[in-house]
């Protein structure tokens, strides 16, 4: 990767970090009670959505900061799993990417398998209990 490309990615990452930090500073998650049960349900749903958004933005900010660290230590653009170069098109789309597309797909597949197994666990326990 050329120095110019590296500097461009760095500027994009710094801008994204500032944007995410600003968004996270503006998060206001308050718990208020109300006499109306429908308002209570709506506020709970809004709080849950705000928490999910803040969690996602916080995770992305961590990824952006790690990418900036990789730029500083000279490992930016190299997959953290297989040590192969990350495709320039992937870095243009996701400058904070830490894995090549092949390793990222493998990770997502493993996570999907694990969460599928966790979702089946309660059902399996019920079947085993009923069989006993």
Image (cartoon, rainbow, N blue to C red):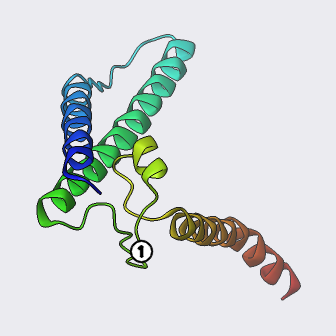
Left or right, 84 with respect to 25, comes to right
Rendering coords of residue 78 (x, y %) = 34, 68
Q: Determine the residue positioned at 32% across, 25% down.
A: 31
**Towards the viewer: 83 or 15:** 83
Rendering coords of residue 126 (x, y %) = 77, 73
Left or right, 81 with respect to 21, comes to right
The 10 Å Cα crowd at callout 1, few under 14, some 14 to 19, many 20 or more, is: few
Look at the picture and state if 48 lies above or below 63.
above
Considering every residue shown, the one lying at the far bottom of the view is 132
The quarter of the image holding the N terminus is bottom left
Left or right, 49 with respect to 32, comes to right
Rendering coords of residue 8 (x, y %) = 24, 39
Look at the picture and state if 51 lies above or below 89.
above
Number of numbered labels in the structure image: 1
Q: Determine the residue positioned at 35% across, 72% down.
A: 80
The quarter of the image holding the C terminus is bottom right
> Can you identify the residue that label 1 sits on?
84
Question: Does dot 1 land on a helix, a strand or a loop?
Answer: loop
Q: Quadrant of residue 17?
A: top left
Considering every residue shown, the one lying at the far right of the view is 131
Q: Quadrant of residue 28?
A: top left
Q: Determine the residue positioned at 73% across, 77% down.
A: 125
Q: Determine the residue positioned at 37% across, 61% down.
A: 98
Left or right, 102 with respect to 17, comes to right
**Towards the viewer: 5 or 28:** 5
Rendering coords of residue 18 (x, y %) = 18, 31
């Amino acid at each position: 990767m050329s120095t110019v490309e590296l500097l461009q990615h760095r500027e994009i990452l710094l801008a994204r970090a500032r944007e995410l930090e600003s968004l996270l500073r503006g998060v206001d998650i308050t718990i208020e009670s109300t006499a109306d049960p429908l308002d209570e349900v709506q506020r709970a749903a809004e709080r849950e959505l705000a928490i999910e958004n803040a969690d996602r933005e916080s995770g992305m900010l961590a990824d952006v900061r790690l990418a900036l660290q990789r730029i500083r230590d000279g490992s930016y653009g190299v997959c953290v799993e297989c040590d192969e170069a990350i495709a320039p098109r992937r870095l243009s789309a996701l400058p904070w990417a830490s894995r090549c597309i092949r390793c990222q797909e493998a990770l997502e597949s493993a996570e999907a398998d694990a969460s599928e197994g966790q979702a089946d666990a309660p059902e399996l326990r019920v079947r085993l209990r009923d069989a006993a």
